[in-house]
Image (cartoon, helix red, strand yellow):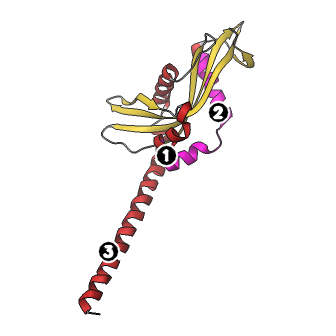
Amino acid sequence: MPDHYLATRRSLTRLAVLAALLVIAGALGGRLIATRVRESNAAGLYRPAVRDAAERLLESRLGIAGFGGAPVCATAYVGAEPERAGRRRVFVRVRCVEVCRRDSVLATGSAIATAAAVTLVRSERGWNPVGFEAPTDSAYARDFRAIFPPDIRQLLRSRWDEAAMEQRIGERADRLHPGRRLVAGARCEV
């Protein structure tokens, strides 16, 4: 074989190896960035004021109230995408429960548990939730794959901290109806 053919072949092989390494590095870099965002911003990005605003947004658009009560939503931070042009998506677990007064206590009615990608926009006062995406019942699996990146999907499939979510529901219900206690097992009536 001519020398120039071998040299060209070696150059192409080196180029292919370099391209493969860049693809792998890019994939790992993206995953490392997502992991860093998830770990480092749980307190800073999804701070209490942002969490409260996100929960109010979810209550107004996702929560259901089939028995005449009011929806109360709780969220658990899972991760976030890096900022792009003053916007970013925060991934949360969501549990919304209808809360109604029953005698001297609070009872529960309709409920939903899902995952959501809450869109945040940067303002002078910090991050503000402006919308969200959540999988629909009719196409849950397809929507779940479309909305959430693979590493976030894996985290969302892991076990939920039900006790923390129930505690948060209780706190939000207390704000809605001060002085009344949410009682486990008490149900709303029509």
Per the model, the C-alpha gap separating discs 2 and 1 is 19 Å
Q: Is residue 24 left or right of residue 171?
A: left
Magenta: predominant secondary structure element? helix
Which residue lies under the disc numbered 2? 164
Tell me the tag on residue 15: 3
Residue 115 image offset from top left, x and y in percent: 55, 35
Per the model, the C-alpha gap separating discs 3 and 1 is 34 Å
**Kind of residue sitting beneath label 1:** Arg
Residue occupying the point 49% across, 29% down: 51
**Viewer-side label of 3, 1:** 3
Determine crowd level at label 3: few under 14, some 14-19, many 20+ residues with C-alpha closer than 10 A.
few
Residue occupying the point 50% across, 44% down: 145
Query: As displayed, is residue 173 above or below residue 162?
Result: above
**Kind of residue sitting beneath label 3:** Leu
Tell me the tag on residue 38: 1
**Kind of residue sitting beneath label 2:** Ala
Q: Is residue 125 left or right of residue 115?
A: left
Tell me the tag on residue 182: none
Residue 175 image offset from top left, x and y in percent: 57, 16
